[in-house]
Image (tube, grey):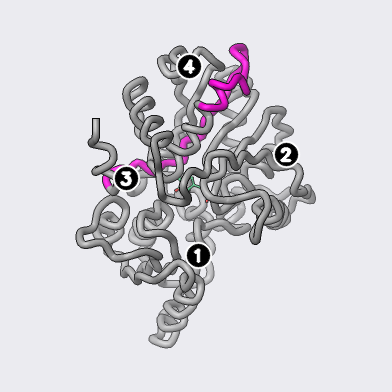
Amino acid sequence: MMNLESLPRFHLAEFPTPIHYLESFSKALNGPAVFMKRDDITSLGMGGNKTRKLEFLIGEALNQGKDTLVTAGGVQSNHCRLTAAAARKAGLSCHLVLNGEKPESSNGNLLLDQIFGAKVHFCERKDRERKLELVADGLSADGNEPYVIPVGGSNSTGSIGYVNAMFELETQLRNMQLQLDAIVFATSSGGTQGGLAVGAKIINFKGQVLGISIDQTKTGDEPFPPILAEIATTTARRIGSSIELNEEEFALNCDYLGAGYAIPGDMEFNAIRDLARYEGILLGPVYTARAMGGLTDLIQKGYFTKDQTVLFWHTGGAPELFAWANQLQAV
Ligand SMILES: *Cc1c(COP(=O)(O)O)cnc(C)c1O
């Protein structure tokens, strides 16, 4: 395997991110010891998991002489907000294709996109991929050098950030003399899970690497396991590793999809209040509150035992909170 240090990478934040023991939360649930890896507080633009991916994506963009980042996501996309912030730090322009309606007044991540000076293009969800191409083509026609980042930054370049994150975790666990039975996190476009799974296999991690799906399903028109296998295997090849991951090797829970993507309900709002009131830590309604709500339910059902240790990998998203103020302020 090649040394990851030799890959083009643009510094965006301080690593390692801390690991915190959630003492009050763990005791209240009377289940396993729950630790948290704080990728929500990576130091750029209000933090989140896309920072690790963007370090490698922007490294590649700069290496290729690009001058403009173009990416897409939902109106409250954390990925788009962090791409907008990272572009500024790297001296690049940024265009965002956001699917959804332009709200009367901007809030949450959309407000931050605008503060970071990104150019925002709205479109319908079904037109997103085409619109992304059109925007990139328009930029090229005007003499710019666009670098297109896929939704969520989930390709074999972005995912290297999470292979590296697994190596970072290994060092921290060794120093803390901590052994984990499971790592639990929100999964959606697959780059985080794909990278973590590759890293876990390389370091021979013995615990479960369990993605709680936010919107993906195991079956249907676009089943998620083949997508994960593709991201993981291409990422491994990119870093010169011959490991392959097949669909069955991913631990994936799709039981907490609620009413759909970016439609939080009672489970999510309760998870936000619980973690805020036990630990003073904030979750985001779209991703991390759903994953934490799922983990809480699994613990309550006895999926993990009291003598086990679980790490919740906090992937960020608190800036989404303000877009759901109406639902959250209800007592
Ligand atoms: C994007 C995102 C995820 C999901 O990560 P993927 O790599 O897309 O699967 C989880 N949590 C938050 C807060 C995110 O913004």
In the image, which residues are magenta?
297-322
Of callouts 2 and 1, the N-terminal one? 1
Spatial distance from mark 4 to mark 3, Cα to Cα?
Answer: 26 Å
Q: Are marks 4 and 3 in contact (CB under 8 Å)?
A: no
Binning the other alpha carbons within 10 Å of mark 1 as few (below 14), some (14 to 19) or many (20 upward) gives many
| Percent x, y of residue 303 | 62, 23
Q: Amino acid at mark 3?
A: Pro
| Residue at screen point 45% across, 80% down | 134
| Residue at screen point 44% across, 64% down | 72
Q: Amino acid at mark 2?
A: Lys
Spatial distance from mark 2 to mark 1, Cα to Cα?
Answer: 26 Å
| Residue at screen point 45% across, 75% down | 131
Left or right: 226 with respect to 153?
right
* Residue annotated with mark 3: 319
* Residue annotated with mark 1: 149
Tag nearer the camera, 4 or 3: 4
Left or right: 139 with respect to 331?
right
Spatial distance from mark 1 to mark 3, Cα to Cα?
Answer: 21 Å
Q: Secondary structure at mark 4?
A: helix
* Residue annotated with mark 2: 201
Of callouts 4 and 3, the N-terminal one? 4
| Percent x, y of residue 171 | 59, 29
* Residue annotated with mark 4: 29
Of callouts 4 and 2, the N-terminal one? 4
Q: Amino acid at mark 1?
A: Ile
